[in-house]
Amino acid sequence: MHFEFQIEGGNFSKAGAASSQLKKILKQLNVDVRVIKRVVVALYEAEVNIVAHAWEGIIYIDIDTEKIEMKLVDKGPGIADIELAMQQGYSTASQEVREMGFGAGMGLPNIKNNSDLLKITSEVGTGTTVAMTVYLNS
Amino acid sequence: MPDQQLSETLVSYEHCTDSVIKQLTRESALNNKRMKLREVVELLNAKVVSGEDQLDAEIEFAFASDLMSDVLTLETDNLLLLTGLANLQTIRTAEMSDINKIIFVRRKKATDEMIKLAADNDMILIECDYSMFKTSGMLFGSGLKPVY
């Protein structure tokens, strides 16, 4: 199964809409609730990251009998130092993002904790790609 | 030891164990305390703005935070969320975290958009005029447990 979602940078009223839709799909597919939670928490944090930092993005989701693969490709400022960005507490988020209850430097660590595989590639000035996999029997 | 003194000692010992047992029972009752949301609303003099049909639901654990990323790290089920953050992301975060009971503290109000999204997800939203500290203290004192 394949799904795609468009994400608008800066539009906080829609942030989470894609994760919400995926949650409904996974529920319909009778995926274990604990797996659903890991998937949607990771995806939601990554979705909020696009809204918070990038100009626009696309989420690609592929579901098969073993795993859920999520790839988020954004056009945006990119991440200069991915290792630093992965550190808990490090954040470049704006005041607006902090007012939304995020921007404490926990997003990427949360994503890492909730996914089985995580790969982040980024080019400064162009954009970032976050690829995450969650196994259904993890 | 004269008989009189012995019997007095035994009586006071009995009193002592009695009170210890009572105290332990009270503590264990307190430790196993669950609260109905109806009781929570009454205690906090609060107002339900969505999901009134869930007032008979029971809760055991509560967590207080304005930081949604912290909420997203929780693994506990059947959780009551106390927060001073009232915007759509609060509802979205709750949705992702399988939390469906939220109290907004510090006189924060849920917007129509939040109420609609909450209703779509079968959530109960409660507004409370007290500070986060006071609300947490009252609920903790009533026996609700912390997540950690």
Image: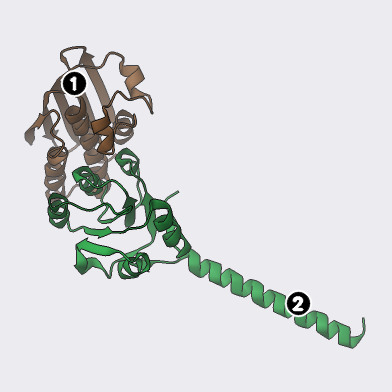
Chain colours: A brown, B green
Q: How many numbered discs, if any?
A: 2
Residue plotted at (19% across, 63% down): B51
Quickly name the residue at label 2: B13
| Quadrant occupied by the C terminus of chain A | top left
Q: Is residue B46 above or below residue A48?
A: below
Q: Quadrant of the N terminus of chain A?
A: top left
Q: Quadrant of residue B69?
A: top left
Name the residue located 65 percent from the left edge and 71 percent from the top edge.
B20
Residue designated by label 1: A129
Q: Are marks 1 and 2 on the same chain?
A: no
Distance in Å between CA atoms under marks 1 and 2: 71 Å
Q: Is residue A100 left or right of residue B113?
A: right
Identify the image quadrant of residue A56: top left
Give the farthest residue toward the right.
B2
Residue B144 visible from this viewpoint: no
Q: Is residue B124 above or below residue A81?
A: below
A68 left or right, relative to B73? left
Q: Chain of mark 1?
A: A
> Looking at this view, is B121 or A130 the one in front?
B121
Q: Residue at x 21, y 16 (%)?
A: A78
> Which x, y percent locates residue A54?
16, 23
Three-letter amino acid code at disc 1? Thr
In the picture provided, is A107 more to the left or to the right than A28?
right
Q: Residues within 10 Å of mark 1 (few under 14, many from 20)?
A: some
Residue B128 place in picture, x, y as percent: 31, 59
Q: Is residue A138 above or below residue A24?
A: above
What is the secondary structure assignment of the residue under circle 1? strand
Q: Position of residue A18 (x, y in %)?
A: 12, 38
Q: Are marks 1 and 2 in contact (CB under 8 Å)?
A: no
The image shows residue A81 at horizontal and vertical percentages of 31, 14
Secondary structure under badge 2? helix
Task: Kindly identify the amino acid type of the residue bearing the numbered disc 2.
Answer: Tyr
